[in-house]
Amino acid sequence: MKLGFFTMPMHPIDKDWRVSLQEDREAFQLADELGFTEGYVGEHTTDRAENITSCIAFIAWIAAATKRIKLGTGTINMPNIHPAALAANMAMLDHMLEGRLIFGISPGGLLSDAEAFGNLDANRNEMFLEAINQVLQIWSVEAPTTSRENTGTSRRNGTSFRRSARGLSRGPCNSRIRRSWSRQWRHSRKASPRRRRAAGTRSRRTF
């Protein structure tokens, strides 16, 4: 049997933040030493009890302090981050972990986070599907170019982006990330016609 664990994590709100972060780091180090195969950490920006504001930053911090355990984002709240920034950061983090990264994503469930990022009244499930599709597209096309060829555009919040400028110079080193989420996206796209229709409010990003 293989063991894994998930932590939000949660701490008393009057506890020294530095102490909380150090304890969270030590928990993952101990799990690695005990032979756990996977460890996931959550993120919330506005919850004082759940003190990890960025699971990407936290995983980058503990990457060199662990050796075997796979580290997962549990989860990236997709409506709260720009897909281009996420694609670049996850690709770099995957290289840092040499394939030990697990890419966990969700629409996010904390309403105070949604309010802070300006999507409280938006269809966050629709934004979630839009964002992961764009991340996968970024990973699958060529790096940015100044060429004016391929003038296809995508409308996002009234702004046109050239498809030819959506790639990154480097994608994730673990091709399984791309394959698994590509399959998940195809499944979600087929299974969610109702979700993809605006439920009174269109998907809006505030970037």
Image: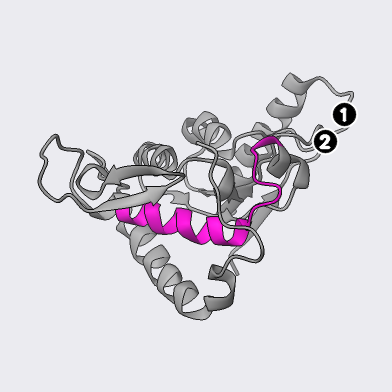
> Label 2, label 1: how many angstroms apart (C-alpha)?
5 Å
33 magenta-colored: no
Q: Main secondary structure of the magenta part?
A: helix
Q: Amino acid at mark 1?
A: Ile
* Residue position for label 2: 49
Q: Mark 1 = which residue? A: 13
Which of 113 and 163 lies nearest the eye of the viewer?
A: 163
Q: Residue at x 66, y 33 (%)?
A: 53
Q: Position of residue 12 (x, y in %)?
A: 88, 32
- Element assignment for label 2: loop
Q: Which color scheme is applied?
A: one colour
The local crowd at label 2, few if under 14, some if 14 to 19, many if 20 or more residues have their Cα within 10 Å, is: some
Name which residue type carries label 2.
Ala
Mark 2 touches mark 1? (CB < 8 Å): yes
| Magenta residue span | 116-137
Determine crowd level at label 1: few under 14, some 14-19, many 20+ residues with C-alpha closer than 10 A: few
| Kind of element beneath mark 1 | loop
Residue 90: x and y in percent read 42, 42
Residue at horizontal 57 percent and vertical 48 percent from the top: 79
